[in-house]
Image (spheres, helix red, strand yellow):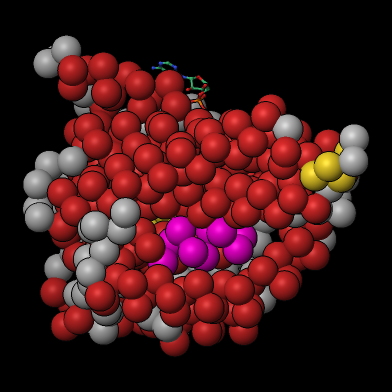
Amino acid sequence: MEGYLKEEHLEMQKAARRFTDEKIVPIADKLDQEEAEIPQEILDEMGKLGYFGILIPEEYGGLGLDMISYVVVTEELSRGWLGVGSVPARNVLCGEVLTAGGNEEQKKRFLPGMATGALQTASAGTEAEAGSDAANIRLKAVRKGDEYVLNGTKMFCTFANKANIVFTYARTADVKPKHRGISLFLVEKKPGDQFQPPQLVGNRIRTIGYHGMNTYELAYEDCRVPVANLVGEENRGFYLLMSGYEVARIQFSARSIGVAQAAFEAALKYSKERVQFDQPIAKFQAIRFKLADMATDIALARQFTYYAAAKRDRGERCDLEAGMVKLFAAEMTLKHTWNAIQIHGGYGYTKEFPVNRYWRDAGLLPIGEGTTEIQREIIARRLLGE
Ligand SMILES: Cc1cc2nc3c(=O)[nH]c(=O)nc-3n(C[C@H](O)[C@H](O)[C@H](O)COP(=O)(O)OP(=O)(O)OC[C@H]3O[C@@H](n4cnc5c(N)ncnc54)[C@H](O)[C@@H]3O)c2cc1C
């Protein structure tokens, strides 16, 4: 069953499972209901375990591990709480982008701190008019001497308050096609809800789930960034954004599977305990078949995620597989977290059981990192050879 997992992956999985069961599961429901953030002690422990630098090369202070390691850790953390399984994605993914596109000075300056979590990052791509149409970025960066001056707004920048560096995609040329005029800037800031320096202003956007990390609308008002913080060449930033998609989508599947697994385990337990018509509801075929479908879909999604991760680890192109598994895992998780509520009957619709959290969290999965519709479009384009 776990054919893709070698001894070292099983060790990582075991450690992440223990950490999740001891530290995350006991606090997740309460903090979710309070819409609270992940406690700093948890972030610190995750830093010590190396989770912020799983893919960051060892020479820059990371663990330098493979994608499968990242997948197994993500699934376990997300089983406890989606926010916790998602938080390392910022440093890991920004680390990928910086490793691929940054110069030696930038890598030496930022990657070691990102690997330990001493430096936190957020990624600001999305704007009001640039959601699925990611190339439609309008936030402007204009060079003035040895600085760029940034003006405009970003939407949905998750973790922006905690971040020391906001990876900001900005327009540096008005050209057609639009994606050829975008550059990537490292916007440094002090972490905290007050958003210093003052030229970067953040307004929190309240969400229905995915708590633990806050998400922000950011306004850049004459925000000055040194030329040294331009990543790669000017107008090549969109390619850097795209270069992270395979890793991001495979990891997103692992997040989905963690949530689905948690919902399945809760439903299985409840179905054995809840008695109606003088027998546990697990004896009714309608409930048994739901459980069978849940376990089957989760196993398929997990194996396909390992497959896509293994392709990526071999250095092979895997955008098709990453799109397919992201699509499948997100949809099946939304479906089965609802099935878990259904198995709990009226109690599932209360805040007394964690299944309501799994379902609210699952709602993000078909939207983030490329919507379900966009994944289908990508898959169809590849199939049709367009
Ligand atoms: C909680 C949360 C956290 C987020 N965190 C971040 C973050 O940290 N950084 C960041 O940059 N972004 C972040 N995002 C943004 C996220 O990536 C976008 O919401 C997502 O890409 C969709 O963009 P949109 O919301 O503008 O929807 P739209 O693009 O406006 O889509 C609306 C609908 O139209 C459909 N649609 C659009 N275009 C097409 C098409 N060509 N064909 C078919 N259907 C189409 C979509 O699939 C969707 O159903 C976050 C979002 C949320 C909700």
Q: Is residue 248 left or right of residue 74?
A: left
* Residue 99 percent coordinates (x, y): 19, 65
Q: Is residue 323 above or below residue 39?
A: above
Quarter of the view holding residue 238: top left
* Residue 23 percent coordinates (x, y): 63, 78
Quadrant for the C terminus, please. Answer: top left
Residue visible at 54% across and 78% down? 19
Residue visible at 70% across and 65% down? 28
Q: Main secondary structure of the magenta part?
A: helix
Residue 332 makes an appearance in the image = yes
Looking at this rendering, what residue extends furthest in the left direction? 315
Magenta-highlighted residues: 73-83
Q: Is residue 187 above or below residue 381?
A: below
Q: Is residue 200 above or below residue 119?
A: above
Q: Is residue 139 left or right of residue 201?
A: left
* Residue 205 percent coordinates (x, y): 68, 46
